[in-house]
Image (cartoon, coloured by chain):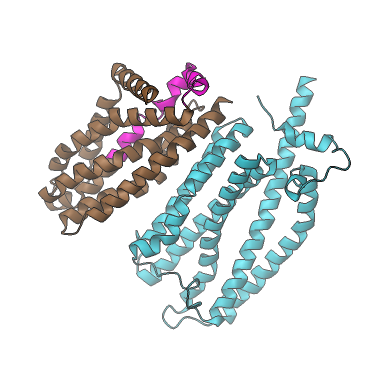
Chain colours: A brown, B cyan
Amino acid sequence: MNSFLTILKRDVRLAIRDGNTGGMAVAFFLIVVTLFPLGVGPELPILARISAGVIWAAALLSALLSLDGLFQADFEDGALDLFALSDPPLEYVVAAKAVAHWVVTGLPIIVAAPFLAILMNIPADGLWILILSMTIGTPGLSFIGAIGAALTVTLKQGGALVPILVLPLYIPILIFGVSAIDSAIFGGNPVPSLLILGAITLFAMGLAPFAAAAALRAALE
Amino acid sequence: MLVHTSLLNHTLHHKPAGVRSSPMQKYANPLRFTRLADKILPWSSAVAVAAFIGGLYLALAASPPDFQQGESVRLMYVHVPNAWLSTQTYMFIALLSAVSIIWKHPLADLGAKAAAPIGLIFTGLALITGSIWGKPMWGTWWVWDARLTSVLVLFFLYLGYMAIWRAIEDQQKASKVAAILALVGVVNIPIIKFSVEWWNTLHQPSSVFRAEGPAIDGSMLWPLLVMVLAFQAYFVTVLLWRMKAEIVERKLLALQYQEASE
């Protein structure tokens, strides 16, 4: 647990001092959401109808933004080799780094989401479920994203490839995240969707470290 | 720069006599594999051509029009085999990827790589024929129903899989990374299969695989099955062609490096 926390702290500190992760993710999130009223039109009922989907889709894109940095810097300066040689298994390192990614991108997105939801005229019933569904779903985004980041770690221009690899895998999170909010807004029961969302996140947390670590090992050979 | 020299070595070194190998090891030898492929290819291509001719005749001329859908039901005979083969090919790639990771079988990743573009075409054709069929049936080219959407996602999975092969220059590294991606993506296959039950929308539920037996009449089932046979034989033929081409390509590359190093 100690090494987990050490890696987590190290990555969070690096991201904060680097200064272009958390703030960038939120700024990007804000801009993407702003595009939709401009594109769709300012009618409040339409915005209310699409608010949950727009915010979730924007969250997926924001989570993608900082993914290619997840292992790249450590791969290039050799830190990843040291991680692979050191005592805690690489799976463990991947999990710690994914959690760090969530802390610097997922968490700011969750904090920003309710404000954007109000801009999107989300009905009040959906607001708490939005926060809840994002809290449950965004860790899944970081963990699934870690797979894509690990698969493309050797590529100098992996940036364009990561979305192609990762976004299809994000789709279930998008579907159930939005359906939880929509059922809360339109008089349904959000609990089943939230439970499935939780299952997807747990599944991703269980599977992704192994897949990503395997990809990193292949890259380090 | 690493080259797939193991393929070349297999052909150069003879195995000591008296060592028996399993069939899986036996066909890790690309020369043996090529010989086997050459034996299968005439048959598979003949079956493909014959089944296509017979199946298209049955589908377009001999089978009756549907009492609801009319003549446009004939699209089914092209659409359904494409849709089946699109998921089947992905399962095939995932299976070979697992074989490649577990046993490091040199032909497994070669087969997976060779199958991907075929699967992509099947998936694309399933989407296009489905769309053409959807226009008269649903009155629109595209509906965002669960099944269509998950086939579209499958299309993206194929694209990502092929993109990673293309992006990583070192083919041995690429085979490992692509295999991991294929296994991660296979999680999507059950979602496709069960999405009909999950969301239950416009797309009609599966009418061939049902517990009570096929809901489709024999006069339409037979042409469909012949067409499926044609597509399967086509898949085998093109797969073997592509694998043979890939073997030759890698051998050429290995020879070039050998020559350059001398």
- Between B37 and A36, the one nearer to me in the picture: B37
Is residue B175 shown left or right of residue B183? right
- Between A136 and B159, the one nearer to me in the picture: A136
Say which quarter of the image contains residue A33: top left
Q: Position of residue B231 (x, y in %)?
A: 61, 63
Q: Position of residue A174 (x, y in %)?
A: 31, 47
Is residue B134 shown left or right of residue A60? right
- Total count of labels: 0
Is residue B114 shown left or right of residue A4? right
Q: Can residue B29 be found in the magenta stretch?
A: no
Q: Quadrant of the C terminus of chain A?
A: top right
The answer to whether residue B60 of the structure is visible from this angle is no
The answer to whether residue B204 of the structure is visible from this angle is yes
Vertical relation: B258 (above or below) A139: above
Q: Which residues are magenta?
A: A59-88
Q: Can residue A67 be found in the magenta stretch?
A: yes
Say which quarter of the image contains residue B69: bottom left
Residue appearing at x 67%, y 54% in the figure: B238
Q: Position of residue A55 (x, y in %)?
A: 23, 42
Q: Quadrant of the N terminus of chain A?
A: top left
